[in-house]
Amino acid sequence: MPVLPVLDIGAPDLRVCAERVPEDSISSVEVQQHIDSLVDTMRSVNGSGLAATQVGIHLQICVMEVTHNPRYPYKPSFPLTVMINPTWEPVGSDTYSNFEGCLSVPNLRGRVKRYRRIQVQYLDRKGVSHSKLLVGLRAGTVQHELDHLQGLLFTDRVEDKSSMTTWANFEAFHKENWLSEIAEVIQEEKELRTPSDS
């Protein structure tokens, strides 16, 4: 499938709320091609997730995957996951400070408060329903991608604007301290393994 251009912040399509995918159309050629294009595009730019709105497709679809990702070498690996019409709710009130970046916000990162544990419900590309407990950075990724489906960017959720930094300065001045800060979060995620559900 074709690799699609990822929209940058300021593009009006990024602010459009995505529409639910009718369940009887999930198996259609059009929806399946959208999914394949999302996966190919995400992998081509070393993303850990990509929402359909980021490529101008206004449907509630997002894809996620981490396998030795050079953009996020500290993220525990997880298999390719396709989520259609996803929803989530927090499990408990624990949060952590996630230092987020985004393919649609080139060369910037900033701190965003995310729930540490969430329950996510979605349909996979075969239309099968899933309900899963996710923790840590993967839970943060899901919250980030589902924000996109509501027309939100991580920059909307950065409470302390002074945390905004370029990727180079994140690596040079912030990464080591932040990873130490969230070591327990990453360890919990590593201990919770989920099978492939793509």
Image: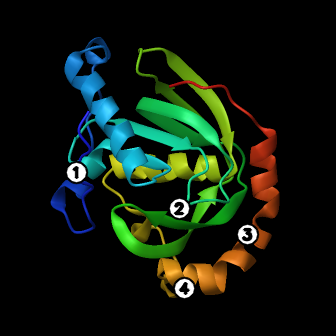
Q: Residue at x 49, y 83 (%)?
A: 165
Q: Residue at x 46, y 67 (%)?
A: 157
Does residue 73 appear left or right of residue 82 in this picture? right
Q: Amino acid at mark 1?
A: Val
Q: Residues within 10 Å of mark 1 (few under 14, many from 20)?
A: some
Tag 2 residue? 71
Does residue 79 appear left or right of residue 9 in this picture? right
Residue 141, image x, y percentages: 54, 50
Q: Which mark is residue 169?
A: 4
Q: Residue at x 52, y 34 (%)?
A: 80
Q: Amino acid at mark 2?
A: Arg
Nearest to the observer: residue 138 or residue 113 = 138
Mark 2–mark 3 CB contact (< 8 Å): no
Q: Amino acid at mark 3?
A: Leu
Mark 2–mark 4 CB contact (< 8 Å): no
Asked if residue 103 is positioned above or below residue 76 in the image, the reply reads below
Question: Disc 1 vs disc 2: which is toward the camera?
Answer: 2
Q: Which mark is residue 179?
A: 3
